[in-house]
Image (cartoon, helix red, strand yellow):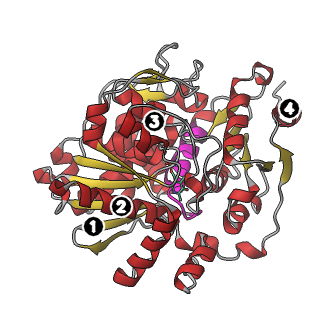
Amino acid sequence: MCAPLRFYSTNRQVPAVGLAEALLQGQAADRGLFLPERFPPLPRSELAALRGRPYADVAVAVLRRFTAGVFDDDTLTALCRDAYDYPVPLEPVTGRCHLLRLDRGPTASFKDFAARMMARWMGRLHDDARRTLVILTATSGDTGSAVAHAYFGLPRVQVVVLFPPAEVSDRQRRQMTTLGGNVTMLAVDGQFDDCQALVKRAFADPDLRDVHLTSANSINIGRLLPQAVYYVYAYVNLADADRGEPVVVSVPSGNFGDMMGAVIAQRMGVPIETLVIATNANDEVPRFLATGRYEKIAPSRVCISNAMNVGHPSNLARLVDVYGGHLDETGTLRRPPDLAAMRRDLYAVSISDDETRATIREVYARHRVLLEPHGAVGWAGLQHALADRPALADRLAISVETAHPAKFPEEIRALLGIEPDVPPSLAGLDRRPESYERMPAAYEPLRDLLQARFNSR
Ligand SMILES: *Cc1c(COP(=O)(O)O)cnc(C)c1O
């Protein structure tokens, strides 16, 4: 196996670190985001050999290239088998278009894939560290529950989740507030952007140096690497990998962590010919690709695909970096990326709520396939790409469904007049007692709470 990979910061003001440090730090000390110094290749022959293998085996094949020197293969294999014990359906829909359903984990969103792996990695690494690790996270719905479930009950780990109560669905909230234990839930009187800003401020606050904070948001590299795996899994099972058959992949995007997983898979050797970035009305990235100018959207626009209501995606700095540019932590473009290459590889499109609803109706009426709002944005984005780029017309295509329709029963009922089947993971939620604390959208109360409860001195 090759030498351990190192991870550099997109701001390049600090030396590169190993995976363990990158995981435990979350964000680099210069407020940049970690990226691997190289993308280890997955040769065609190895890709082809992964066809038909269990998901956990594919995870090992991909992740061992990043974890070498940190976890041995036996440890990684055990962690992957433990984390990935649920199905990953690949559903043919129409023509050569497929749906990759990432909604069968314990909290019914794709975020389970990364949160479960990262929690297991951190749990192992933290064993040596001997202090309480505080996982601080902001959520617009699904991160909070995936992270809280993944870290629930881990020794010497506390989880603190900030969420905007008006922007999460009833079921999303209950998934987070019915755990208790080492999970502290804070309902912030504001928007997701406020929650994210508070979390970022806490990470940068020298007053909190005795609170061992780390991030489980997708700024943590541990949230990205496991998200490369399902693109490899889908590809090897649907494509002629021996021939290097090209594929079109569509990812409904908010903070761009899921999409960065696809970029990693692509750089490792999965021939993703076009990566469709489908956003809701928060269209700052489609505009950026079209104009070359980057402007955040503040406040972010409230859409029915609520987990994607992001006006300044935290992972955009990584995408800009892999295309040779530099976007700093304030959202200022210091060096432009290679826009021509981005426009060639990517297809970015914004989908309105009206079109999202129409897509849910149409895909159900025509194909009897049930989408929820996020997956519908991805599907609509894919159709735009196939229509706009004639060369893609007969390509194998994969659209990602990022959440289970039963997380959004109100919307599905209103649109289709049916009640989505409730997966076992969501059953019984309505009866469990909830507990959470309310907080204003101001920094001092958060700092005081973290100091009072988690100071390690
Ligand atoms: C988080 C989330 C997204 C957006 O993913 P990013 O990695 O933030 O782009 C899309 N759909 C659902 C259901 C989500 O929970």
**Is 216 one of the magenta-colored residues?**
no
Most common secondary structure along the magenta stretch: helix
Query: Taking 111 as reference, is 193 above or below it?
Result: above
- Is mark 4 in CB contact (under 8 Å) with mark 1? no
Residue annotated with mark 1: 97
Q: Magenta span covers which residues? A: 106-124
Label 3 crowding class (10 Å Cα cut-off): few <14, some 14-19, many 20+? some
User: Mark 4 or 3 closer to N-term?
Assistant: 3
Q: Position of residue 82 (x, y in %)?
A: 50, 56
User: Mark 2 or 4 closer to N-term?
Assistant: 2
Q: Is residue 393 left or right of residue 187?
A: left
Separation (CA) of disc 4 from disc 3? 39 Å
Q: Which element is circle 3 on?
A: loop
Residue annotated with mark 3: 71
Separation (CA) of disc 4 from disc 1? 50 Å
Separation (CA) of disc 1 from disc 2? 7 Å
Residue 309 versus residue 151: which sits nearer the camera? 309
Q: Disc 4 residue type?
A: Glu
Q: Position of residue 22 (x, y in %)?
A: 53, 28
Q: Disc 3 residue type?
A: Phe
- Is mark 1 in CB contact (under 8 Å) with mark 3? no
Q: Is residue 299 visible?
A: yes
User: Mark 1 or 2 closer to N-term?
Assistant: 1
Q: Which element is circle 4 on?
A: helix
Question: Which mark lies nearer to you, 4 or 3?
Answer: 4
Q: Is residue 268 left or right of residue 308?
A: left
- Is mark 1 in CB contact (under 8 Å) with mark 2? yes
Residue at 65% x, 49% y is: 139
Residue annotated with mark 2: 399
Question: Which mark lies nearer to you, 2 or 3?
Answer: 2
